[in-house]
Structures are given as structure tokens and as C-alpha cells.
Amino acid sequence: MSAKITRDVIESYLHCRYKGHLTLAGTRAEPAAYQTLRLRDRRDVRDRAAAAIRADHAPGEVMCDFDLSLAVLKQGVTHLLDVRAEDESVSLSFDGLRRVPGRSLLGDFHYAPVLYHESEKVGLVQRLLLAALGRVVGDLQGRQPDTAFVYRGRGDCPARISLTVRLQEAASRAWRDLREQQMGASRPRLTLNGHCAECEFRDGCHQEATKTDDLSLLRGLREKDIQRFARKGILTVTQLAHTFRPRRQRKRSRAGGHDHNPALQALAIRDRKTYVFGSPRLPDAPVRVYLDLEGKSGDSFVYLVGVIVVEESVESRHSFWADRPEDEPRIFEQLLQLLRGYEDFRVFCYGSYERAFLKRMRKHAGRKRLADQVLARTTNVLSVIYAHVYFPVYSNGLKDVARSLGFAWAAPDASGLQSLVWRSDWERTGEDSLKQRLLQYNLDDCAALKRVVEVLFALAPGDAGCASATTANAPPSARVEDLDALAFPRKSGSIAFANPDFAAVNKLAYFDYQRERVYVRTSRTLRKNVARSKERVNRKVRVSREVVVEAGRCPHCRSEDVAIATGDGAPVWPTAGKRAFDLVITPAGIRRRVIRCRTRPYRCSNCGRIFVPEAYERLDKHYHGLKSWAMHMHVGHRLGLAVVEAMFREQFGLDVDRTELHMIKGLLAHYYRPTYRQLLTSLRAGSLIHADETEVALRTGRGYIWVFASVETVLYQYRPTREGGFLGKYLEDFRGVLVSDFYAAYDALPCPKQKCLIHLIRDMNQLLLNHPFDTELKSVTEAFGRLLRAAVTTIDQHGLKRRHLGAHRPAVADFFGTLSGQPFRSEAAEDLRQRLLRNRGGLFTFLEYDGVPWNNNNAENAIRQFGYYRDRTAGRLGETGLQEYLLLLSLCHTCRYRGVSFLQFLRSGQRDLDRFCETRRRRRFPDMQVYPKGFIPPHYSRVRKPLAANSAGEGVRPTPKGGVPG
């Protein structure tokens, strides 16, 4: 006869499937000390909770110690304690049942499960256990309870827990799995997890996993990661190590550091070597403080603060002990008092526990400035290890890392869980030996942290080297860059020569240098070419038109009584004037136009100042026609600025360098900013928006490009992060349908949403490829495929019309109705089912509106158009230049969507794109075009000197420097 499923089996299964299998099979092992402690604390909670229940209710309202049956439940007693439920396959014990209102077979009430829990925190395991117990009582009373109660910690007041649909479905899957194991139909795979530290089977499981070199030995891997590797045939740590491929670091890596690489961790274990990736830099100070805390599990009580201070190689140790929670502020003040005596210090800790304690105590501290100083000087060493240092250990816990470096604790069984046992025993007995053991353990943790920090400083770049800097008993170390050099031998680029003579010879061997400084001395042709390249081309082109700039009023006092300055005090004014360049574009071709502007200095009769006309000072070197053609080439035809510069020289005989082209881009972006705002307003007022986002590499890191498109409009927006908090303001007052992918940031917008079903069916297709023999998964995808194909066929025949698409709504309702009541055994099928149900409201919105598509083509096409530019300029973009380009790109693709020429729109000078699409009229530009007020072009190397001094000793004020306004 098979073993019965007990509460212990269920609880073990919820912690670990393999542990549930062992418990169901009757395997026994000596419980760990921490497990014994938890059981003892749970009994204490049970006793206090039962006493509180009896004290609050009349004797007839509480029943204890009986077998669960429908007859007992129909009595309607308020509290049922110590309930047993047993049949041929199950033998369960309930801590209790509590009567709650709600119709059931019992009447207008039903029962919810009660649980005693030793910790103040109610975790997922406890919620699932309540849901699993609730299914048993729910089957009996004809209603599944949607709430449960937990007596925790002190046990005097229960916490109400909501048993959600997801919890109940997970509990159903647990029951199904356990019944299959009970019948011998399945056996779970051994997978180590976070529960192993307190499990009685940990030694045997760890030995078996070590024997098979199981991937779950790597503590950073989730179960889904292990399954993903298994689909690739990677089942062991050694196999994973062989998959590591060194990759050259990006020239501009993101500021946040690097993601942890499991393959490199496996390689460190296989080679028994410490690998350093990047630059593990720790901040330093003359005084190093190593901090470690000990606290009680389940609450926020820290009872021991351990500190090791190292100043000029002199070490001092300090311990601050708290008997009760009321003593916690005192030991925090003692810590502050200790650190107050050091002027320049750096606090090192391992993990976020210490920093969280400092933040919590800072709220109630009397010396907040000192507390803020300590917080600002606290460094989490684990964050540096996680990103940069791969020790040959299975986890990055302090115990594993320090032991790999040769450190040993005074107590051989020392661990965080064991310290909780020691503290609990001390609280019960008050034995001084237990307190001394805790003090020693805490200082050992500080010393272990000190050892790790010293090794990290030795591994930092700039030291004598990894191997020579580390101390004895530590594993050998190497840098990933060394592996990279073997994988990618240098073929080009600058070389660091060991011999200075070689470096000097190499410096004189570059192509440009030899042509301009060596070959030019023997080649007549090269001499002419070099001389020609240094000519000022723009000064030699023939002038097409002369313009004389006159002044109408004084820029200082605004008087109109001005005249050309003559006489002895008049300044000498250059006669060459300024040149401006333009392109005249006609259907027959494009021709160059050169405008020379001249002026004279003027004197104001009212204030006596000498000045030149403001229009002359602000004369634009490049007129609107030239700017339009340049940006049409750069944005519309995706030509690089270097190519546009060469085209100006070769086709028009003009020298327009890249600095000026960047300036032109900024000026046009400033000019058309009102057009962008107008398009955004019309987009918000529309009935449909497509949205998408993509990543872009900048000079200073990474950013994100967001695209918002309709059938006629495209708008690009740069954001430094992928956070969607700006969407509410950017799309304010939009009440149409938003078409997007499944990114959660879009869900916060208060409008109907349509998810891109192309994204969904691609994900489904990948699931089918990953699980080709999963019949449950195939049943879901085939049903969804038939449903979607029928709707798309209707769209193909009749278009996006609601009156035709409405015929598919009953089929959609039937599909989701079947799906909601059909949990699956297959994890892939169940995940897909949950995803479909979770996004049910946004999958078939297009059936309810006219003109709403079922995919995100408009936004994805706009992303693709930007991608051409991104691929060519990756890592070389600045935020300002990118934002200017995106504004012009928005206009370019909006013109394309509306069937008008981007070049003709730019040439027209119109800022109202809707009006231009209707009239196609051009704006008439003045003979003189000027820069915006406050703008200084970059080709002005210096501000002009004052023309002359007035009677007060003041000259002409230079135009203030600044970028494009706005």
C-alpha cells in the first residue's frame, strides 16, 4: 500500500519537490538544529494562539481534537482546533478552521483554514500550504475558501490572507503532482535550492549533486535557467564552463557594471582559479571599518554589532550586544560613537543587511548628520564581487568565498542559521558560553570580510599583478582580458611597445603622416594636393548677390536717430564683409548661391555709442535651402555627415565641415520644434497610437528610443532609461486604443489596449520548438491559432470593421472560458495559459473598434527606420545630437506616411505640416537670414573685440554664448 500524503509531505513539497518525494517515500534523517528551533517556536505560537482563541470565545464556540466531517462542519462552531482529515490516501492535520460568512453546502457560512507560523513574515510557502489545505475543506463544504488566517510571531492576533486564483491553481498542481508521486508515476529531479541550508536531507542531496556535477550546485541559477540550459544539452557545471566565450568589453559599457555570468563562474570552479572581469574597484580610506551584524530571523531586531577597525596596520575589535529589542538604539549609538572618533574612514559590509539596518536606525537617531556620513561611506563588497570577481566557489556567500581564500571560523559548524539557534538557546538559558560563542562568531565574520576586502584590493588594476599580490592559501587568479587576448589576437590598432625606439619608429609610419610630411618632399603632385587642401574654398567662389545691411535703430537705447559713423572717432571697418551660402533647388537641378553682406559702423546720436547692425552680427552662414538639402541627405537618405561634407565640396565647391553640419542639425531641430509639438497634440487627439521602444548605445552609456505612431504620424522620443513613468504625461488626454507589445509600462495608461499578437505567436512558436512533445502546449496553441486565423481572414476580406469582426466575439469568450477552467500539468502550457488569462483584456480589443489592427507594424517599422542610423553610429552618439536627429526623423517619416516630400517640406519653411499637405505653398524667406537670438555658431573661434569705446569706456557687448534656445 502506498504511503499517505500528510501535511509534512505537502509542506516539504512546497519547499522542494525532491524533499517532498523523499518525505513521501518515508526517508528519514536527523533534523537540523535550525529546523528543531522552528518547530519549537511553532509549538509556542500554537499554545499562545489556542489560549487567545479560548479566552476570546465562549466554550461552545471552540471545538478541539476531532476528525473532519460534513456533520461536524454543519454545527457551525466558530473555531475548530486540531482537526484531522484522513482517508485511504491522505492523512492531514489542520491547525484550525475558522467560520466565515459565505454560502456553501453548510448554509450561509463556510470554513477557512488557520495556520500557526513561527515567523512574523508570511511567505509564499505558507500561502500555498493554506491554499492546499483549503482545497480539502473546500471539497467537503462545496465552496473553496478565498481567505485564510495565520497566527504568527506572538500568536495573539491572526492575519487575514487572501487565497487568490493563482494560489489555488498552484495548490491544485501540487496535489496532482503529489498524487502522481504517490502512485509512482513520476519522480522529481534533484535540484538544490535555498531551502537546503535548513533541510535534514542537505548532506545526502549535496553529495549526490556533487557526484553528478549538477548545475543546481551554482546557487545563482534559477530553476528556469537550469531548464533552459538543459534544452541545449548542458546538464553539468563542467559542461557550462565549456560554453564560456570571452567577449571584448564594449568601448562604452553601461555605468551599472556587468551582469553575473554563470558560465564564467563554472569556468572558475573547473579551473580552480579566480577570474577577474573588468575593474573591481573599491573605495578606500586611511581607516578601514569592517562591519557585520547578527539579527533574529523573521523580525527586524539586530542584537549584535561587530566591528574591526584597521588604522595604519593597527587592528582593534569591538562588539556591541543587545539583550532586548529595546537595547537596539543603544548599540547603534555605540557604533556611531566609535566611528565619530575617525576623520576619514570607509565602512565595508557584505550584502545589503547592514545598510538596511543603518537606514532604519537613522530615522530615530539623535545624530542624523553622523548617521548620514556613515551611510555615505558604506560599501557593499558583495556587489563588487557579483559583477567583477569569480571565485572558484558555488555561491558568493561570505562563508564560501572566505573559506576559498584560506579563512577558517573558530566554530566548525558556524553559519547564519546556527547563530539563530545559539541566540535562541541563550534567551532560554542565559548561558554566558553561548553569548561568547556568538561574539566570537560575529568577529570571525568581520575578519572574514577583512580577508575578502584585502584580496579585492590586491586584484584591483594597478597592483603588481593578480598572482603576486594575493596572499598565501588563496587560489591562483587571472584576468578575463588575458583569455580575451588569446581568443581575439590583435590585428590592428595601437600597440604598446616595450622598446621606446620601436614606439618612435611606429609613430612615424602612419599613412597620413608619410604623405603629408615625407612623400610630399619628393612628389610634386602631393605638394600641390596638400597645398590645395589647405585653401579656403569658400572665399574663392564667385559672389551671386550683394546685400548692404543698414541699421534702423540703436540696439542699446532703441533710438532711431542713428547715422554712419564718420570722422576721427570712427573705427576702421573691413571691406570684405560676410558670406552666406544657399542652394536653389528647382525641378531642373540644384545651383549654388553665394550672398555677400556688407555694412558700416553706426553712431547713435542719443547715447553716443558705436555699433554695427544686429542683423549683420547674427547673419546665418548657411541659408534655409542649404540646410534643408543637407538634412534631407542626412536624415532622409541616411548619409553620414562625412559623406554630406564631401558632397558639398565635390558637387557645389563649398566647404561645409562636420561641425557646421551638426550646427545645422541643431538649428533645424530648434526651428521645427513647434511642428513636433503640433504633431504630438494631433496624436493625442487621435483614436489610435502604436508604441514601441528600443535600446541605443551612446558615448556615455545606453539609452532608449520610444516610438509613438499612428497611420499618418510618427514621433520619436529619447529617454535615458526604459522606465515608463513619463508615458502618462507624454500621452495625457489620449483616450483611443494603444497598440503595444507586452511591456508592463503601457498597462498603466487609462485607455483601451491591444497587444501585438505577432509578438505572442512568435513566443508561442518558440515554446513549441522548445517543447516539441508537449501535447498540452500544442492544444493551447492550436486553439489560439484557429481563433486568430479566423479573425485575420475576416480582416483580409472586409478590413478592420467592427461589424464584421464582432462575429468572432463568442468564439473568443468560449476560448477563454475553456482556458480558465483547465489547469495543465505541463509547466510550459500552464505558463502560457496564465499569460493568456492575464492579458485577456488586451488580446482581442481589435474586435470591438473600427480601424484598430492586431499587430504593431507602424511602430515596429519606425523602429526599423531608426535602426539603420543606430547601427551606423553605435557608441558615437551624444544625447543632444540624438534628440535633434530624432525630431527631424519624426518629420521625415511623418511626411513619408502622408505622401509628401520631406525635402519639399523643409524647403517650404512651413512649420504647420497639416497646412503644407493641403496647400504645398512655400514661405518667402528674407534676403538676410539670421541665427536665433543668443546663439553663437561654433565656427566663431572668438568673440569680436569692441569696435570702439564710448565716453563711459564701454564697448559693444558681445553676443552671449549659448546653444539653441529651448
Image (cartoon, rainbow, N blue to C red):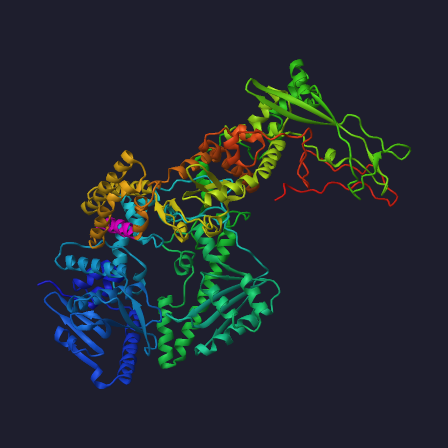
Residue 901 lies in magenta, yes or no? no
Picture coordinates of residue 99, whole percent (x, y)? 23, 75
Magenta stretch, main secondary structure, is helix
In this view, the residue farthest toward the front is: 919
Task: Tell which of 909 and 829 is nearer to you.
Answer: 909
Query: Taking 676 as reference, is 360 above or below it?
Result: below
Q: Visible in this render: residue 414?
A: no
In this view, the residue farthest toward the left is: 1
* Residue drawn at x 30%, y 49% as measured from the top left: 226
Task: Tell which of 884 and 334 is nearer to you.
Answer: 884
- In the rendered image, the quadrant that contains the N terminus is bottom left
Query: Taking 419 as reference, is 783 above or below it?
Result: above
Q: Which residues are magenta?
A: 825-837
Image side of residue 884 versus residue 11, left or right: right
Image side of residue 181 versus residue 119, left or right: left
Picture coordinates of residue 98, whole percent (x, y)? 24, 75
In this view, the residue farthest toward the top is: 524
Image side of residue 606 versus residue 587, left or right: right
Examine the image and state in which quarter residue 63 appears.
bottom left
Q: Visible in this render: residue 434?
A: yes
* Residue drawn at x 39%, y 81% as measured from the top left: 430
Query: Taking 639 as reference, is 462 above or below it?
Result: below
Picture coordinates of residue 596, whole percent (x, y)? 72, 25
